[in-house]
Structures are given as structure tokens and as C-alpha cells.
Amino acid sequence: MNRQDIANALRDMGLKNGDTVMLHSSMLSIGNVDGGADAVVDAFLDTVGPQGTLMVPVFGPLGILTEIIRKRPEAVISPCSKGTVAAIGANAKALCEGHGAGKSVHGDYSPYTKLAELDGIICLLGVDQDRNTTLHSLEALLELPYLSDTTGVYTTPEGVTEEKTWKYYPGPHRDFIGFERFLRAENAITVHRLGNAQVRLFKAKDLFTIGLRLGRQNPAFALCDNPACEACVKQRAAISRDRFQQEAFRIAASARLAGKYIPEIIDNLKAAGVDAVELDYLQGKACARMSAERLTAAVQELAVAGIAVSALRLQHIPEATEPLLKLAVAAGIDRVIMPLYPSCADAVALAQQNGIRLVFANHGQTSLLAARDFAALNMTPTRSFCFSATAFVKAGEMPFLQSYRIGRFIKTIEQLDIADMTWTEEPTRLACGNAEIKELISILRCHNFSGWFSLGGGARFPGTLKDAADDLFKLIDTM
């Protein structure tokens, strides 16, 4: 195979005079070529002609073809030390100039977005989508929350070299290989053969049209779902955390749902993008029955990992509340959730004396009884009620259509336990039982509820913390 053979093959694939082509390549994949790598480069330049342009990434050791193009005297090099490209041809200057002027390396004003504006073509020669740098442009334009800042060198149009920091820069592992199926689904890619190499050709503008639509629907489109891939687990967590931060409510998860031991709880909370935990059970035992030393150590270990404690939760009616409140104070916990019961008025005064925010959860009462008992406490602040939809199910009520309305809990709710169950008290995934949890979440979001949503709070969830968080996102997506 020689220069002319390659040029003829490229024309047969559809490349033509005047095309602007972004080439990602592996010379070794082609096989023997008379004239070596220079012949391959010349064949591409012959194909696109003097009115066309050939561009390659040169931000690292990316193969001999890119090096040959970079070193040719007619090559134009983009003035950004990150995501750098080299180009030869009619559009070389237009593609490269201003690279780095925008807020991101791969986004607006980059050679990658300009390629689409020029109706350019991406060619993957003996490589797959994992080498397709333009996919990073999708992430940058979408401003995905797992991206980070990067600092490098930028040369201004006036020739001044300066240090600059760009936003939305890619990090570790991606599942770009999986993107190709979306191009195939819309007949936006063709696959050919050159020597031993597969050649993939597709329009840059098609990649942006399909990819941006996909990314808006699923911000994790570029990430793998391998639970053993630490990089993608962390990046998915960043997406979840960003979604939670866009809500008015605060999110926490019960320790029982998050795991058994503190390290496991921390890992699962971080993977779910949740930064607060409700301490109900640790190592299979009620946190309210732990020693002050053990509970304090647990709180401190969580704090070192960046996990806040939303509350200490008591699941039973205590004989005396003073030991519980003293335990919370000793452990540095300033919020306690306990069952609502008629004789709990003394706990309110004790909590105020100890600087504890006391929150009461319905515990099997009907809504009328719960509202009456709570009103009798004359709580300050008024919003100190934890609404347990599953507990109202146990009381035989429809939590949204009956309990929430009858008890007028819109005025007193400070936390919604995110859990579900059937009338027969079987725990279910969210919106698969009788707790009307979707309706409750929806109405509170309509009010920009700024209290707590507690995943698995006060009830068992038949799955993992990630399952619960995913269920919550799915419900929100349908509202």
C-alpha cells in the first residue's frame, strides 16, 4: 500500500477535496505502508486538497502521525497548552486561533467546536471512541459537575504568554467507547477498512447534536457503570451531589441504610452524593444506646470524611429523655428525632436547656392524634415535625390524601422520611407501595421545602442507599 492507494481508499470512503478532518490515529493498525507515516499524512492532505484542512491532537505523545503533522513547517499549533491541536490547510489558522480564550479548553472557541461549525469530519483511524477528544467538548459544553479546573499556559493574540486556569476539564476514566452506539442508532457513522485498520467517519456536528441531547437527558452518559471503577463512581457521585444541591431540601440518609460500619457508611454516602447521615443504627445496634465515647468517636470519624450528622434518631419511646439528650450533647449532635407520644412534653424543656433541636416523628398514631399531640407541645420553632408516611400507613391512613391534609402538617413539617411500604407493612422501593411518597415529595418541592429529606429515615428500605437515591431522582424526573 502506498500514498496513492491510501488517497484512493479515503476518497472511496467519502472524504473529498475541501473537507476539514480531525484525525485520531494508530499508524501500527494499518500495516505496511510504502513511505511510512509520511505517506499516510500526505495521502490525507492529497485527499482534502489545498482547500481542505487536516487537524490532529498534539497535547501529548499521541502517535507518529500526529508528530509528523506537528513538526511540518506549514503546521499551525493552537496557543493553549491543554488540549493542543496542530492543523495544516486552508482552515488551520481559523481552527487554532483563540484556543484557550474561552472558559474551558474543549468548549466554546476551541478547535473542537469550530470543527463542527466548519462542517468538519472526525476520522478514527485504527482507534475507537476512547481516543475521540471531541467528546470532551460535550462534557465541557454541558458543564458537567464532575469536571474540574486545570491550569496551563495560553498565548494571547498579541503574543503574550500567560498562565491561565480553565474550567470543566476532564479527569480520569470515561466510557467513550459506549458512545458509538448512539451514532449508529442515527446512521451518523460509517465504518471502513484501510489495510488492517478500521476507519470510522462521522460529522462533528452530528456528534454535538446527538451528544448534547443525550447529555442533557443523562449527565452520566460518558461514565461507565462498573461498581469497581472508583473514578466513575466518584464522578457519578458528583452528579448526584450537584442534583441535590439544586433542590431547596436538604438530603440525608439513615445510617442503617448506608451500611453497618462507619467506613462502609462513608463510602456509600459519598458514592450516592449524600453528605449527611441520620444516626439510627451502627453495627446493628441503636445509636441511642451507645456509650458517649463510641458515639463521639463515630461522629468525629464521619466529620473527618466530610459527612455531617443530621440527627440522632430514637426509634422507641424512652423511659427518660435526659440521658438521650446528654448523649447527643456529649457527641456534638445538636438535633434529635424521637417518637411523638403524649407524655413527651418534659423532653421539650430539657432539649432547650441543652441546646438541642428536638424533632418529633409520628409513631403509629392517626393524623388527628399526631396533630393533637404535637400541638400540645407548643414547639418553638413550630416546624419540628418529622412526617413518617410509612407510620401513617401502619395507622391505616393514606399519607398524602388523608394524613398530610387532615393534620395540616404543611405548617409543622421539618423532615420527610423517604420510605415506602404496603398496607401489609412490606417495605417497597419508592412509589411502589401505599405511602404516597411521590405525591408528598412533589407538594413539598412546590413549596421549596427547606427541611430534611431522609432516605430510609424511620423505616426499612428494600435495597441499597444507591437504589434509594436513584429512586428519588427518578421520581423527581417525573414531576
Image (tube, grey):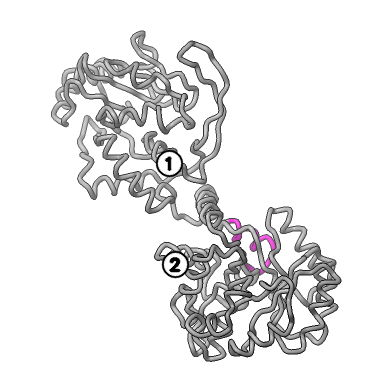
Residue 461, placed above or below residue 206: below
The numbered mark at residue 47 is none
Magenta range is 259-270
Secondary structure, magenta segment, majority class: helix
Q: List the residue tagged with mark 1.
A: 139
Q: List the residue tagged with mark 2.
A: 475
Instruction: Find residue 235 and report its horizontal and vertical position in percent.
Output: 52, 49
User: What is the spatial separation of the Cα atoms under label 2 and label 1, in whole angstroms?
Assistant: 25 Å
- What secondary structure is marked by label 2? helix
Location of residue 416 (image quadrant) = bottom right
Q: Nearer the viewer, residue 357 or 172?
A: 357
Residue type beneath disc 1: Glu
Query: Could you tell me which residue is drawn at 33 percent across and 44 percent down?
Result: 211
Q: Nearer the viewer, residue 235 or 111?
A: 111
Is 264 a magenta residue? yes
Residue 46, placed above or below residue 254: above
Instruction: Find residue 292 and report its horizontal and vertical position in percent.
Output: 84, 69
Residue type beneath disc 2: Leu
